[in-house]
Image: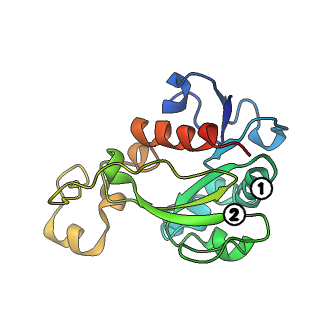
Amino acid sequence: MKAAALYVDTTRTPYRGIPDVDCWGVERDAITYAGPWPVVAHPPCGPWSRLRHMCGPEMLAQEGLGPIAVEQVRRWGGVLEHPAFSRLWTHCGLPTPGMFPDSHGGYTIHVEQWLWGHRAVKPTWLYIVGCDVPPMPPTPDTPRPPSGGRAATQRDRSTRSMLERLPRSQRHVTPPAFAEWLVQMVTASPR
């Protein structure tokens, strides 16, 4: 079975190196994806996240991709990844973690991307349709989130999250182990 990784930066995505994954980004216009494989959808998070204030007009203009990605996950099965508490959940009526599945059989779980190697604490919600969640990575005996990268002043630490302190190029990066886990999720479960 194959999977489609939608709304990814095809030049830097770890999905490029995973066998049987078809990557869709700006070049191929992920909006036009017409199946048949289940999807791992990464629509732009900025317009929907708590960090919206850091988005420029070009990023804010991509807000419409979120609801389209939700519909693609519902149609083809798969998973949509977004920051925890994304406004996309309210906008699309998605169930939050712990709620019963929606009318499409979709449910949401909360994960922490640092467990897969992200450089910052990055609480993430996954909206899942037609897939089972594979085993999670083991939690370290003494969980210690990463530092968030470059050194920050004391004032910087108190007013900005670790994710905000990361260089822009690293905030949205999907850890390779996380990408592999998401692909495993969508390809191991029959729809």
Q: Is residue 94 visible?
A: yes
The amino acid on which the numbered mark 2 sits, given as a three-letter code, is Gly
Mark 1: few, some, or many residues within 10 Å (few <14, many ≥20)?
many
Nearer to me, 126 or 66: 126
Nearer to me, 60 or 7: 7
Outermost residue toward the front? 190
Could you say whether the residue bearing mark 1 is in a helix, strand or loop? Answer: helix
Could you say whether the residue bearing mark 2 is in a helix, strand or loop? Answer: loop
Residue carrying label 2: 106
Report the quarter where the N terminus lies.
Answer: top right
Q: Is residue 175 visible?
A: no
The amino acid on which the numbered mark 1 sits, given as a three-letter code, is Arg
Instruction: Quote the CA–CA distance across marks 2 and 1.
Output: 8 Å
Circle number at residue 74 = 1
Horizontal side, residue 51 vs residue 139: left or right: right
The picture quadrant where one finds residue 34 is top right
Callout 2–callout 1 Cβ contact below 8 Å: yes
> Residue 175 at what x, y percent from top left?
40, 41
> Residue 161 at what x, y percent from top left?
32, 67
Whether residue 101 is situated above or below residue 46 in the rendered picture:
below
Horizontal side, residue 152 vs residue 187: left or right: left
Mark 2: few, some, or many residues within 10 Å (few <14, many ≥20)?
many
